[in-house]
Structure formats: C-alpha cells, structure tokens
Amino acid sequence: MKIDSFNKVLIKTTPKGQGVFANYNFTEGETVIIGKRVKVVPDRTVYSLQMGFDLHIDIDEPGRLINHSCSPNTGVRNNEFGGYDFVAISNIALLEEITFDYETTECIVSAFSKCLCGSVNCRVIICGFNFNSEELKLKSNKFIADYLK
C-alpha cells in the first residue's frame, strides 16, 4: 500500500490489479486527484489517456492507476498541467475506490473490452465514447475530455 504526498488517496493492490482509494472523505465537486502529463506517447497503451483525436499521454501516479467504473465517483476535467483533474461527482467515503468512466476520455477503449466494474449500471462491453448512447453522452457532458465536447 502506498499513500500519495497529500495523504488523501492511497494505492492498493486488488484482485483487478492496482487501484486508488480515498484516504479522506471527499465531497461532491471537490478535486480528488490532479493528473499531470508526464509524456506524450506515440500509441495508446493500457495506461495512456487520450487528450485529443491523435494525442495520447501518460499522467503521473496516482491518476494513472484509477480504475474504470460504469458508475464512477469522479469525472474528468482538462487541467493546466496537460492532463486531467479527477473531480468527485458524488461524495466519496473513506476507503472507497476512486473510479472514472474510461469512455469519457477515450474515443475507442483498447485496454479491455469486457467490463469488470460490477456496478448495477455496468454496460458490460466498453468500446469508447464514439459508441456511447446520446443519453450517456449528455449525462457525462460536464466531465468529459474537452476534445469530445
């Protein structure tokens, strides 16, 4: 287990691999993690995030370890560091896993295709923003990558 420098989140190993967990009670609207760009990558990877139609980046930890959920507790917002802020879209309790919807940054998801989030609203198959319903696109509009708006 590793705790970040601000002691508000911690990284733990789970059956799904590493994940990020709240070490603090976050309130809706609060910035949970500031993900800073580390480098531009030539091709998408398991850990890269899409920032533009032809731009994929790596961000620093703990942001790069946030897992996907179809019912996420954070949404993304472009930031001044060339990455994404992860903002609480609901209250997040101490020790709750921090998650975001990968389809809010990726046109096409390549890290995995079958979702394992286990949420009540699980979409099971994760393809990318281009494949989302209009209803989901409208619901996510406030917290999606700027290039997708």
Image: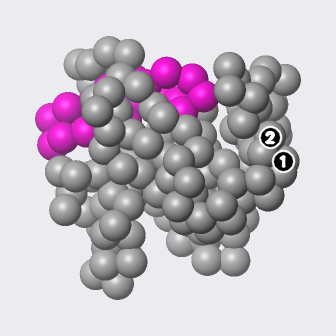
Up/down of 137 relative to 86, above or below? below
In the rendered view, does 126 fall on the left or right side of 22? left
In which quadrant of the rendered view does residue 3 lie?
top right
Up/down of 7 relative to 96, above or below? above
In the rendered view, does 121 fall on the left or right side of 76? right
Select label 2 or label 1 by which is in front: 2
In the image, residue 33 lies in the stretch drawn in magenta: no
In the image, residue 54 lies in the stretch drawn in magenta: yes
Q: Residue at x 84, y 47 (%)?
A: 95
Residue for badge 2: 23
Q: Which type of secondary structure does the marked residue at label 2 adopt? A: loop
Across and down, in percent, residue 33 comes to: 55, 38
Q: Residue at x 75, y 29 (%)?
A: 7
Total labels drawn: 2
Across and down, in percent, residue 143 comes to: 38, 61
Q: Are marks 2 and 1 in contact (CB under 8 Å)?
A: yes
Across and down, in percent, residue 99 comes to: 61, 51
User: Residue 95 — which label?
Assistant: 1
Q: Nearer the viewer, residue 147 or 86?
A: 86
Which residues are the magenta region?
A: 47-64
Looking at the rendered structure, the kind of residue marked 1 is: Leu
Across and down, in percent, residue 116 comes to: 67, 56
Looking at the rendered structure, the kind of residue marked 2 is: Asn
In which quadrant of the rendered view does residue 130 lie?
bottom left
Mark 2 Cα shell of 10 Å, populated few (<14), some (14-19), many (≥20): many
